[in-house]
């Protein structure tokens, strides 16, 4: 019998059929393995390339629970952990001892960033890898808050909302620029892009990734954008297009390799100017020569033009030039509305034939008015301890008065007790969002 005939008989035998099924199963498992490997590489490319490094990082983050698929951003792998924090882990080729030192220097100074606009960093003491954990960037449903691109490119938003957000940003940057590390380096943001600035439901802004560009340094930021333009970064396609659109808002010295030594707080002023133009015009910033200044409020022209100067030395040194905004009606102090509320309640009581109750309410309202006015007067005279006393009296008499808590927070802030100020600000916000805005606007006007 020929060999071929024997093979045919073996193939059609029960044993041959079994071998064929095993071979088919083996091929199927191989294909499945390579498919899953491809899926892992595509969904988490950085972890695939640097498995040992990211396994070490995940060990440090063992107590936090991850949510959803990680995304690749400009500076590394970004994910949501514990349903409340945004985690950024840069790849090992970006991180060295010098960058880790700058990152830890920033984290030590981060406790001084008591402005509510900054996303808070959760400090993790480690010297093996760089991990950024930020709170305040997610909604209650563990989704990212809408950023400036989504909010302020809507032309229906009022001018007061736009100006309020920019003033709040100016106030936060003013505080950031006033801080220095232990070795004397001034802090700055470095990547003030619309996609990294978020807006809460109560119109409060949140600034993300503070300290990231400072830690990596100007040369690294320059190199990352260069790689992005050359399509050499393993980054999400949508995010890459978004960043390429926003790169124009970076200062000229950040784009020129020969001028990188000039990068610092002055670079934030250029980005602020570009961002303000984008917010006012509700359009993407293209260049300083293609701005429709008719749409931008006239009061802002001089300051924004100086911000957009190509020469860093010609830009503003601080935000004091914006103090004129105190006279803008939308940002005027609104405690008169509170006093008007009491008078309206008194008038309603007059309609009822309860004279003794009316007199009691009238007396209580007068006492509250006196405490409020005396507290405001003490604040204007910089007598913050006396102001604290009067506003304490006010909230004792009326525990649900949001304005009392807001101005008590201001008093504590001026006395340097920032933790107490934040506590009373949160209390004011829980009672009356409009009242809590007094605290935030006070910090804005303080620049």
Image (spheres, helix red, strand yellow):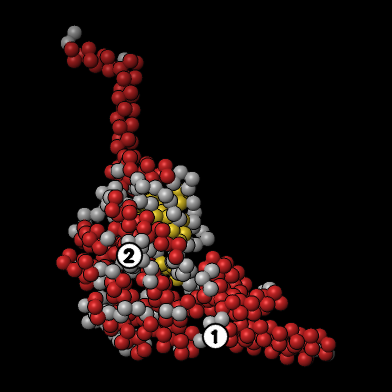
Q: Position of residue 359 (x, y in %)?
A: 79, 88
> Where on the picture, by quarter, is residue 406?
bottom right
Q: Position of residue 239 (x, y in %)?
A: 31, 60
Classify mark 2: helix, strand or loop: loop
Residue at left offset 36%, top offset 47%:
127
363, 231: nearer the viewer: 363
User: Which residue was labeled with disc 1?
Assistant: 381
* Residue 443 locus on image (x, y percent): 47, 76
Q: Which quadrant of the view contains residue 253?
A: bottom left
Quadrant hosting residue 250: bottom left
Quarter of the picture holding the N terminus: top left
Spot occupied by residue 126 in the image (x, y as percentages of width and height): 39, 47
Residue 282 visible in the shown view:
no
Q: Quadrant of the C terminus?
A: bottom left
Q: How many marks?
A: 2
Measured along the vertical axis of the image, is residue 80 above or below residue 24?
Answer: below
Mark 2–mark 1 distance (CA, rounded to whole Å): 34 Å
Q: Is residue 295 left or right of residue 157?
A: left
User: Which residue is at 26% across, 49% downward?
Assistant: 93
Whichever of callouts 2 and 1 sits on the residue coming sooner in the sequence is: 2
Q: Is residue 10 above or below residue 268?
A: above
Which residue is nearer to you in this view: 416 or 211? 416
Residue position for label 2: 184
For label 1, the crowd category at 10 Å Cα-Cα, with few meaning under 14, some 14 to 19 and many 20 or more, is few
Q: Which mark is residue 89?
A: none
Most distant residue in the top direction = 1
Instruction: Look at 39% across and 55% down and name the residue there.
Output: 132
């Amino acid at each position: 019998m020929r060999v071929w005939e024997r093979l045919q008989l073996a193939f059609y035998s029960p044993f041959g059929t079994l071998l064929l099924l095993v071979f088919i199963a083996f091929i199927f498992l191989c294909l499945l393995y390579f498919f899953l490997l491809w899926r892992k590489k595509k969904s988490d490319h950085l972890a695939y390339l640097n498995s040992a490094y990211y396994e070490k990082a995940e060990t440090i983050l063992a107590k936090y629970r991850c949510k959803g698929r990680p995304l690749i951003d400009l500076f590394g792998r970004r994910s949501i952990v514990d349903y409340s924090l945004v985690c950024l882990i840069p790849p090992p080729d970006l991180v060295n001892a010098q960058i880790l030192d700058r990152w830890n220097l920033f984290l030590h100074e981060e406790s001084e960033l008591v402005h509510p606009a900054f996303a808070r960093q959760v400090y993790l003491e480690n010297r093996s890898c760089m991990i950024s954990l930020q709170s305040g960037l997610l909604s209650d449903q563990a989704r990212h808050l809408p950023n400036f691109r989504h909010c302020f490119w809507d032309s229906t938003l009022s001018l007061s909302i736009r100006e309020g957000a920019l003033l709040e940003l100016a106030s936060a940057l003013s505080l950031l620029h006033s801080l220095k590390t232990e070795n004397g380096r001034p802090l700055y943001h470095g990547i003030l892009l619309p996609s990294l600035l978020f807006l809460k439901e109560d119109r409060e802004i949140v600034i993300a990734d503070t300290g990231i560009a400072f830690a990596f340094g100007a040369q690294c930021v320059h190199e990352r954008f260069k790689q992005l333009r050359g399509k050499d970064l393993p980054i999400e396609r949508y995010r890459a297009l978004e960043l390429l659109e926003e790169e124009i808002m970076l200062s000229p010295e950040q784009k020129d390799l020969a001028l990188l030594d000039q990068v610092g707080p002055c670079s934030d002023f250029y980005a602020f100017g570009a961002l303000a133009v984008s917010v006012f015009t509700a359009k993407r910033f293209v260049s300083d020569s293609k701005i429709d200044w008719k749409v931008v409020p006239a009061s802002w022209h001089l300051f924004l033009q100086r911000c957009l100067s190509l020469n860093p030395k010609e830009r503003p040194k601080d935000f004091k030039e914006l103090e004129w905004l105190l006279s803008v009606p939308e940002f005027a102090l609104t405690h008169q509305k509170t006093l008007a509320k009491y008078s309206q309640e008194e008038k309603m009581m007059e309609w009822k034939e309860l004279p003794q109750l009316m007199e009691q309410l009238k007396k209580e309202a007068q006492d509250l008015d006196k405490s409020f006015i005396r507290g405001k007067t003490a604040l204007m005279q910089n007598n913050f301890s006396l102001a604290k006393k009067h506003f304490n009296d006010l909230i004792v008499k009326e525990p649900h008065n949001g304005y009392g808590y807001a101005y008590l927070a201001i008093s504590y802030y001026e006395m340097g007790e920032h933790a107490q100020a934040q506590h009373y600000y949160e209390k004011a916000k829980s009672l009356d969002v409009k009242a809590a805005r007094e605290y935030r606007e006070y910090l804005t006007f303080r620049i």
